[in-house]
Amino acid sequence: MSYTLTTPLYYVNDRPHLGSTYTTLACDAIARFQRLNGQAVTFITGCDEHGLKIMRTAEAAGLTPQAHCDAISARYRDLWQRWQISNDRFIRTSDPRHHQVVEQFFARVEASGDVVEGRQQGWYCVACEEFKDDPHESDDPECAIHRRPLEWRDEVNLFFRLSRYQQQIEALVAQEGFIAPASRRREVQNFVAGGLKDFSISRVDLPWGIPVPGHAGHTFYVWFDALLGYLSALLEPGQPVELESLLHQGWPAQLHVIGKDILRFHAVFWPAMLLSAGLELPRTVFGHGFLTREGQKMGKSLGNVLDPELLLERCGRDAVRWYLLRDIPFGEDGDFQQQRFSDLVNNDLANTIGNLLNRTSSMARKWFDGAVPPAGAAAEADHPLALAALAAAERFQQAMASLEFRTAAESVLQLAIGANGFLNDNAPWKRMKTPGDEVRVGEDLYAVLETSRWVGLLLAPLLPDLSSRLLEQLAQAPIDSSSDPLASPTPWQQALRWGALRPGLALPEPVPVMQRLELDGPL
RNA sequence: GGCUCGGUAGCUCAGCUGGUUAGAGCGUGGGAUUCAUAACCCCAAGGUCGGGAGUUCAAGUCUCCCCCGAGCCA
């Protein structure tokens, strides 16, 4: 089984921001989840590096475009490493092999008769890298999005005959599950129903781009080239570039995760291009929402941009991942609120989950020779916590499979809350004072330790670090998701068996697995 | 201006095809407890469900209009 998923290829106009970090973290959780369940995952991310905007940004910085792209893409790569993103590929559209892919792809599209010459006149926004086909006459029109002056262009470009795919795209877009979340579908459907128009796929006099074979002076339009990065990324290092072979190594993608603003490119233009080239279509395009900060849009002009590097340094991977995945319904817009961020991290992770293990491990060590107590009746599958754990795991699996991180996170949290309640109800610290109750105390502690193990296991895709630390405190090896993907059940699935925690196992000295977040001053 | 999505307790959100006193978590207040990371557990207050009109025996849940936010297209 093969599961390919992608983040967008981030435009290297500027350093990474929180939005791209959010997308990438979400994809990482999906990738890890799929691997744990035995899928051979190819998790793709990378950078989109061509276009006039990049050229000008580089110029302004006194760099060659290539030098600029090298610098920015290195920052992305480095940042993802520090976040421990488990991407399998990092593709740059300036990669020479990507050029070959684009050429081959274009040849196929051309052979299908889908490339025509056309004259394009109009106002162009460099920031959007798009013609604004607004007919209104104005002396100095500006882009509504970027509020920058538009530039007048009059050029002969190559066009992709999108209009030929009207019916196929209509059918595709109407398909259940192709566009997710479903609430985003109608917008695209209406757009398609309005009639698809051919779009230009080349620019003239734009040296920073991939030359169009057979059309001197033309380079490919950034979007045409960028989307193809998803294909280039699948090439093995050293493998000859041959599109056909990609069909056996990961294409079609199961999932493109993108921000809601670029849904159209992925759900309409991209599939049509693939149809033209005779390649299979991705299964799902998921458009997630945007992040605001304390109710306000983040932006340079407001000076309220949350820097992912700073966030990582000051708060750590687990905290940020938890907050973003646990509190924001994936797909909806979300608001980053610092108070809420630290409240949730401290409550959920430090107090509820971390402290649960800490208090239980302390008791077990104190009263049972520093080891996991005998399981006794707690090993039974109908123990209340066994049932709770199983239910949580089922909910978790289902939620993750449908990209509902919030529900998934909640199911784990509920399990930990239940175990805390169980401890309070049974009060082993009281029972321990009653002679003859030691056996019962051992069973209760075993049940909670075992529940903690499940919590650690379930957390693996969402919070890999915390997961390892939890398991370590239980003398368990961290979950290895890179092992044989074909094993069935996978090590993870095997570990999710009630009673697998071995009594008598020496417990390490308890250390808080999750530090409370004490943020003095705004981030 | 057009299209789409959203506007439910201080905050983040659940509320399926309309039907008893609108739910959860966080935050706040109180209680209990001591195994534990001033942690855990229990209880409580808090909402005329953006506004208005309509359909209906009955609307947060359907229809229309308006206001606010977000995205796309102009």
Image (cartoon, coloured by chain):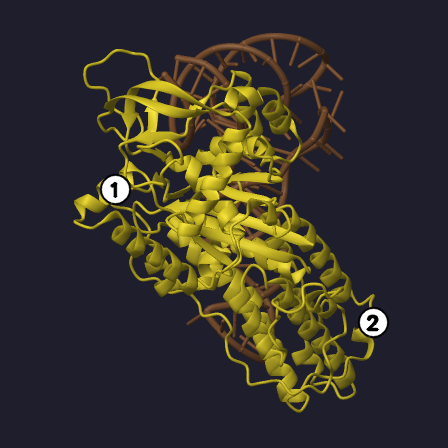
What amino acid type should be assigned to the residue bearing mark 2? Glu
Q: Chain of mark 2?
A: A
Left or right of A478: which side holds A16? left
Work out whether A438 lies above or below B21: below
Residue at 61% x, 50% y is A250
- Number of the label disc, if any, that sits on residue A380: 2
Count of numbered marks = 2
Q: Nearer the viewer, residue A238 or A123?
A: A238
- Number of the label disc, if any, that sits on residue A55: 1
Left or right of A297: which side holds A271? right
What amino acid type should be assigned to the residue bearing mark 1? Met
Q: Position of residue A328 (x, y in %)?
A: 50, 46
- Asked where in the image residue A414 lies, by quadrant, the reply is bottom right
- Marks 1 & 2 on one chain: yes
Color of chain B here? brown
Q: Chain of mark 1?
A: A
Q: Nearer the viewer, residue A2 or A256?
A: A2
Residue A522 visible? The answer is: no
Color of chain A here? yellow
Q: Alpha-carbon distance for marks 1 and 2?
A: 66 Å
Residue A90 visible? The answer is: yes
